[in-house]
Image (cartoon, rainbow, N blue to C red):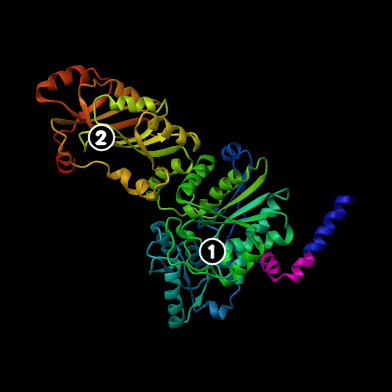
Amino acid sequence: MFLYIINLLFLTILIIKIMSNDYLKKILTSKVYDVAIESPLEKTKILSHKLSNNLMIKREDMQQVFSFKLRGAYNKMANLDPSILKNGVIAASAGNHAQGVALSASKLGCRSVIVMPTTTPTVKIDAVKRLGGEVILIGESYSDSYEYAKNIEKEQNLTFIHPFDDPDVIAGQGTIGMEILYQHPGDIEAIFIAIGGGGLCAGVATYIKQLRPEIKIIGVQTQDSHAMYSSIKANKRLALNEVGLFADGTAVKLVGSHTFELIKQYVDDFILVNTDEICSAIKDVFQDTRSILEPSGAMSIAAAKKYISQHNIKDKNLIAIACGANINFDRLRFVAERANVGEMNEALFAISIPEKRGSFRKFCHLIKGRDITEFNYRISNKDIAHVFVGIKISSSNEIKTIIHNFEEQNFNIINLTDNELSKTHIRYMVGGKSKLSENELLYRFEFPEKPGALIDFLNTMDDKWNISLFHYRNNGADYGNILIGIQVPPSEKEDFQKNFLYISKYQFWEETYNPIYKIFL
């Protein structure tokens, strides 16, 4: 009887709120399910255990266009007068909204023209074309494409379908909030929502806060595309001059007027995440689900991890909306490279050591058993060797210890872990020709990858032969590869081969006469 009264009371409150709130009414009467599924709300097993909290992911990446955007697009178009719809629609989008509009147009039987930034991933462009959309590539961001699309709208008598700043679009996205409360009626500490223009966050926050005001809504933006965060702080909409393009789905210079007002009213806090943190979150979701999110789709997971760390919370129910999975396959190389840094599993350093025999061995002993993930060196100075090195760590606290170990031995060391230039470019550019590389022989070695494999390799070498070039990168494969230059006088080459190469347990190939070596190194 008590539960019946409680449920009746809740229903009465809901009806009152619906009658007084236009957005609640729009969300509850949205037509999204003609094209959208009720996406699963899945608990992460590995990540929840690691974070000591119950982190659930709302799997909008499982929609038929691999993004939540079809909800708002279809709801808007399905509510248009048929006489208007038959003329066709136009949209500006970085990709996911474009697919939603193209799919909706196909379902409703009308023409769709999609203006997309030139920076849009190919996978999204091709998907729009397959769905029947007419693609025009203009500008470098959503804002550039938007201006062009508005001109086309007038010229061709089309109806513009806004990706975020429209009540029907916002209501369509808000159905995700409705599903969350249905799927998890228990306690929820916070819901993390990525923000570009703000349609998703505005819709979900409006619904959640009307019915469950105790649940925290955390808006998530990147450190290089934070138009909403900056606007809320300034209490007015601000346009960014530039936006970062890694998380292209949320690269918006100016947020919407509707979304700004709703987010200002209903969002409790914001978290800004960086590229490395997003890459780490993509990896986390893959390990839990074997699915690969796009950068914007993983922003909410990255923010949840950061929120837990910042607030030191445990045993809470947290929900992150995985809002998209349209990623170019080739981008995964970059994601894998940066994920370890974002997870604080790898630290990068520039270390200067004496240019003399035995220095590499001493260097390796100072690592104190930690795995080396990368080692780049090219002889360039007769007194000092400059080494670019990656070291596997278990937490950021180890960085101070590593620095202390080298400084104690009077080795100059610079922490490059947060240095964007180093992570993006310098690590691939270490090397070049050297006037000091006299009598250099070049070899490639392959060996089974295991903890300590690099140090085992160095220990097989006699110090009488100087290492003048060294490159190693742990790529997570079963076998590791080393490129090494060794200075061996002609009179000692036979000794070198007999007492090192031929007794080595590692497979090797000589590259001394490779023309590429002659050109670049």
User: Which residue does the image show at 51% across and 42% down from the upper left?
Assistant: 284
Query: How far apart are the alpha carbons under marks 2 and 1?
Result: 46 Å
Q: Is residue 415 magenta?
A: no
Amino acid type at circle 1 is Ser
User: In the structure shown, which secondary structural element does the residue marked by tag 2 occupy?
Assistant: strand
Return the residue at label 2: 384
Instruction: Pick whichever of labels 2 and 1 is earlier in the sequence.
Output: 1
Which mark identifies residue 230? 1
User: x, y (%) of residue 125?
Assistant: 41, 61
Choose mark 2 or mark 1, whichever is in front: 2
Q: What is the quadrant of the C terminus in the image?
A: top left
Residue 454 in sight here: no
The image quarter in which residue 361 lies: top left
User: In the structure shown, which secondary structural element does the residue marked by tag 1 occupy?
Assistant: helix
Q: Is residue 24 magenta?
A: yes
Dominant secondary-structure state across the stretch colored magenta: helix
